Image (cartoon, rainbow, N blue to C red):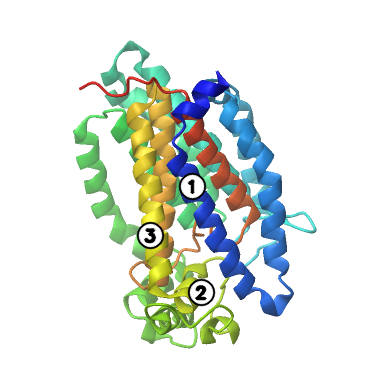
Amino acid sequence: MRKRIFKNIDWGILICTILLISIGLIALFSATQNTEYDELKKQVMWLFISIPIFILVIFVDYELIAKISPIFYAIFLILLVAVLFTESVNGATSWFDLGPFALQPSEFSKIFVILMFASAVNKIQERGKKEISKPIKLAISLVFVAIPVLLIIMQPDYGTALAFIVATIMILFTAGIDKKYIIIGILIIVILAPILYFFVLPEHAKTRIEVFLNPNLDPRGSGYNIIQSKLAIGAGQLFGMGLLKGNQTQLGFLYPKTTDFIFAVIGEEMGFVVTAAIVILYVVLITKGIYVAKTAKDDLGSYIAMGIVGIFLFHMVENIGMTIGLLPITGVPLPFVSYGGSSLLTNLILVALLLNISGRRQKAIFVE
């Protein structure tokens, strides 16, 4: 069985992951030299913690993991409620402070929400593919996503909530949901967007949107981070200013440089060549993830793989988009590259699930 898994695994996914982690560690080495490499040390520690879990997830059949996922789903729902009563950090109650490190339950929730929702859709479709398009059954399946999303919005963490929504859409699209729901969804968004903006969004969220449209509205306040990020990326030009030599990075103008704006650090010190390589690596990773979904041995594997693709796609587009001023700042990390133990472990588990699914696919792959 193990030989078959090794034979079928899409090694390109693993190679892309290793390269992205390596670039991230180099960037963290440069960004943390003034703090005695504290965050770099923690990231390396989390990497070593993640490796045995990563290997275990590859070799335990994903169908078994999906079967036990309701237990972990329930645990993390409890944690998402509990975290709301913790002390606010940077305006959000998203972390449990465990002394030497912090735990972010919304990150780990991604794994089990994808598994639960994919399993629910797969179960509904046992009586036929069109069953998921029945309003009541669709609504029941969406409850598994809606509850954690609402809890995450309450933190508030709009970026992570949007990642869940993108993953849900990708799974439903793969499941062949009736296109009328897509049209209805688009109409609802168009109608609700102005209502949410004027009557629901808190003031700081409105400010982020306004600053996104014009950073110079508040260049020393809300627009400061994006202005510094764009200056850093522009200063890097083709080959960068050199490791440990970036002005915005090393003089403390770029913040937070190890998490939200790590891409700007890379752009300033390593230049367009490396930032372009990062984008290419993500595109390859996402493309291969889609191929894993297409060639999975069953629908459950396809749905899990596409949910994971949705998470990576959103995080890549949003993080890179916000650092270059094309999207509003949401505090979404760059997978495998940004500092964050919860994020790193979660993303490695998601990659392990992709490798798990690819390793168990049939050799005769696709027949149209």
Looking at the image, residue 283 sits to the left or right of residue 82; the answer is: left
What element does badge 1 sit on? helix
Q: Which numbered marker is on residue 347?
A: none
Residue density around tag 3, few if under 14, some if 14–19, many if 20 or more, within 10 Å: some
Q: Is residue 76 visible?
A: yes
The numbered dot on residue 265 is: 2
Where is residue 141 shown, x and y percent of the image? 42, 28
Q: Are marks 2 and 1 in contact (CB under 8 Å)?
A: no
Between residue 303 and residue 105, name the one nearer to us: 303
| Residue 357 against residue 92 in the figure, above or below | above
Q: CA distance from mark 3 to mark 1?
A: 14 Å
For the residues labelled 3 and 1, say whether their Cβ atoms are less than 8 Å apart. Answer: no
* Disc 2: CA contacts within 10 A as few (<14), some (14-19) or many (>=20): many
Tell which of 164 and 286 is nearer to you.
Answer: 286
The residue depicted at 43 percent of the width and 77 percent of the height is 226
Q: Amino acid at mark 2?
A: Val
Circles 3, 2 touching at the beta carbon (< 8 Å): no
Report how far apart the C-alphas of labels 2 and 1 lie in the structure.
Answer: 23 Å
Q: Earlier in the sequence, mark 3 or mark 2?
A: 2
**Residue 125 found in image quarter:** top left
2 vs 1, front mark:
1
> What x and y, as percent, mark residue 273?
39, 70
- Residue 188 placed where, x, y %? 26, 47
- SS for callout 3: helix
Label ID, residue 15: 1
Q: CA distance from mark 3 to mark 2?
A: 15 Å
The quadrant in which residue 303 appears is top left
Q: Which mark is residue 279?
A: 3
